[in-house]
Image (cartoon, rainbow, N blue to C red):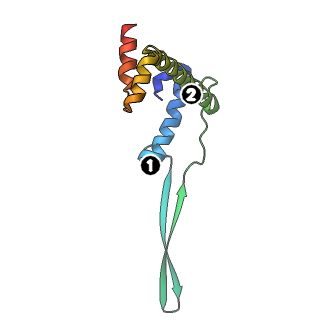
Amino acid sequence: MQRDWLKQEFRAVHDHYMDMRHNFAAHSGDMKIEDANTHVLLILDFDAYRVRLHTNRLQPDISFHEENGKDFTGLIEHAIDVVTQRSSDYSQKIGDAVMSKGLAYWLLAARENGPVNIDTIFRSFHKKR
């Protein structure tokens, strides 16, 4: 899904959560909202000692953001609606392009046992319109 598919009112919320995603999943730390400190522990045992490492990690478990009354739940619901509508629109367009070829075309294609490039049919059908 592209950012520009979303209504303008959801883009700031989308940007916030994408920044969070990029920080944790892709770039790990660019936003400086997480921290890790490692400590060396020397455990004495009479004349010997053992070394242990302990790392204390600080990072948020969850992020909340709201922009003009739009929040994460609203963003997700809107994104689902956008993707569902686009999928439905493209399904209808592909169906129209397929139907434009007629039954004889598809029966012949089935007998030839080869793939049919739907993209070529789709583009030629919609170019004519």
In the drawing, does residue 80 fall left or right of residue 98? right
Under circle 1, the secondary element is loop
In the drawing, does residue 116 fall left or right of residue 75? left
In the drawing, does residue 80 fall left or right of residue 103? right
**Residue 5 visible somewhere in the drawing:** yes
Question: How many other residues sit within 10 Å of disc 1, few (<14), some (14-19) or many (≥20)?
Answer: some
The quadrant the C terminus occupies is: top left
Under circle 2, the secondary element is helix
Is 81 or 75 nearer to us in this picture? 81
In the drawing, does residue 127 fall left or right of residue 8? left
Q: How many marks?
A: 2
The image shows residue 5 at horizontal and vertical percentages of 49, 22
**Residue 32 visible somewhere in the drawing:** no
Query: For mark 1, what is the residue?
Result: 28
Amino acid type of the residue that numbered disc 1 sits on in the rendered structure: Ser
119 is higher (above) or lower (below) than 60 = above
Label disc, if present, on residue 79 of the rendered structure = 2
The image shows residue 18 at horizontal and vertical percentages of 49, 36
